[in-house]
Image (tube, rainbow, N blue to C red):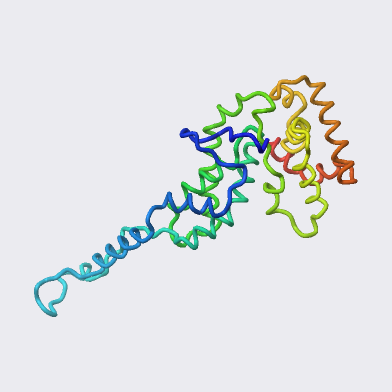
């Protein structure tokens, strides 16, 4: 659940919460980049040195070879500046976060940690002029690889206390439109479920697409218990939002779940 410590923390023991503030994330990225001013000065120095023609000692003397007279292309690759990094960070984090969940729909996997870590590692290395699409692919590749590397750890965890459900409002908010008010109300109701056990079982089965048996095995309960808990959760959510929750969940999450099962 969201109140639990992240399960896939870095080796140092540092952990990130299930939502990371833009300012905090930007600081992590900047720290990974280092001193922008020093880097810019180094680049300028190299460009200036390589663009000067070689001194022949003779005023007005032509270059010995025409190729020598051509400016030398800089071997220093310019990186995206701070403003562009911030723009990419804000534009990509929601898509990367969802992409990690889509690849690993497992409530034991800390998708926020992998999202932040991938952005921190990749954004400082991106070349100037990179497109949004290419930047997303670069960050997404690292995020998924980080989660894949950690999978042997988190799939071995058992018990309800070892789950940490992500806020559905945070996960899907960037995909909602103004006319999706009914779905927004649904996500708010799911995020606000007071019973931890019901919230975990409901999201594992309905949102992540797990079976009763798979859910029961991970949580250490019987299949019958999982079924009863799921029924209670559905009834309470239906009463809260005034619409059969099964219908809303199927219309909103059904396609995603079906697609993931086909992978």
Q: Residue furthest bottom?
A: 60
Instruction: Report the quarter where the C terminus lies.
Output: top right
User: For residue 110, what is the image quadrant?
Assistant: top right
Q: Residue at x 85, y 32 (%)?
A: 232
On screen, 179 above or below 200? below
On screen, 107 above or below 58? above
User: For residue 250, what is the image quadrant?
Assistant: top right
User: For residue 219, what is the image quadrant?
Assistant: top right
Q: Is residue 119 left or right of residue 165?
A: left
Q: Residue 253, image x and y in percent?
A: 76, 43
Q: Residue 101, image x and y in percent?
A: 64, 41
**Residue closer to the observer: 81 or 73:** 81
**Residue closer to the observer: 69 or 247:** 247
**Residue closer to the observer: 154 or 140:** 154
Q: Residue 73, image x and y in percent?
A: 30, 64
Q: Residue at x 83, y 34 (%)?
A: 233
**Residue closer to the observer: 204 or 73:** 204
On screen, 1 above or below 118? above
Instruction: Report the quarter where the N terminus lies.
Output: top right
Q: Residue at x 47, y 33 (%)?
A: 11
Q: Is residue 23 left or right of residue 74?
A: right
Q: Count of labels shown?
A: 0
């Amino acid at each position: 659940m969201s109140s639990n410590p992240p399960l896939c923390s870095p080796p140092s023991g540092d952990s990130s919460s299930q939502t990371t503030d833009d300012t905090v994330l930007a600081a992590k990225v900047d720290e990974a980049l280092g001193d922008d001013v020093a880097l810019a000065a180094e680049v300028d120095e190299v460009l200036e040195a390589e663009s000067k023609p070689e001194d022949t000692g003779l005023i007005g003397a032509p270059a010995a070879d025409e190729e020598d007279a051509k400016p030398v292309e800089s071997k220093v690759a310019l990186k995206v500046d701070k403003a562009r990094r911030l723009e990419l960070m804000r534009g990509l984090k929601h898509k990367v976060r969802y992409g990690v969940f889509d690849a690993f729909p497992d409530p034991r996997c800390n998708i926020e940690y992998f999202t932040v870590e991938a952005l921190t590692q990749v954004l400082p290395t991106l070349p100037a002029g990179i497109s949004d699409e290419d930047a997303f692919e670069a960050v997404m590749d690292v995020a998924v690889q980080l989660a894949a590397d950690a999978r042997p750890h988190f799939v071995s965890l058992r018990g309800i206390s070892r789950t940490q459900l992500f806020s559905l409002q945070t996960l899907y908010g960037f995909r909602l439109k103004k006319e999706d008010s009914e779905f927004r109300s649904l996500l708010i109701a799911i995020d606000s479920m007071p019973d931890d056990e019901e919230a975990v079982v409901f999201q594992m089965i309905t949102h992540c697409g797990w079976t009763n048996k798979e859910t029961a095995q991970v949580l250490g309960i019987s299949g019958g218990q999982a079924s009863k808990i799921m029924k209670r959760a559905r009834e309470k959510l239906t009463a809260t939002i005034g619409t059969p929750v099964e219908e809303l969940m199927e219309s909103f999450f059904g396609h995603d779940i079906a697609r993931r099962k086909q992978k």
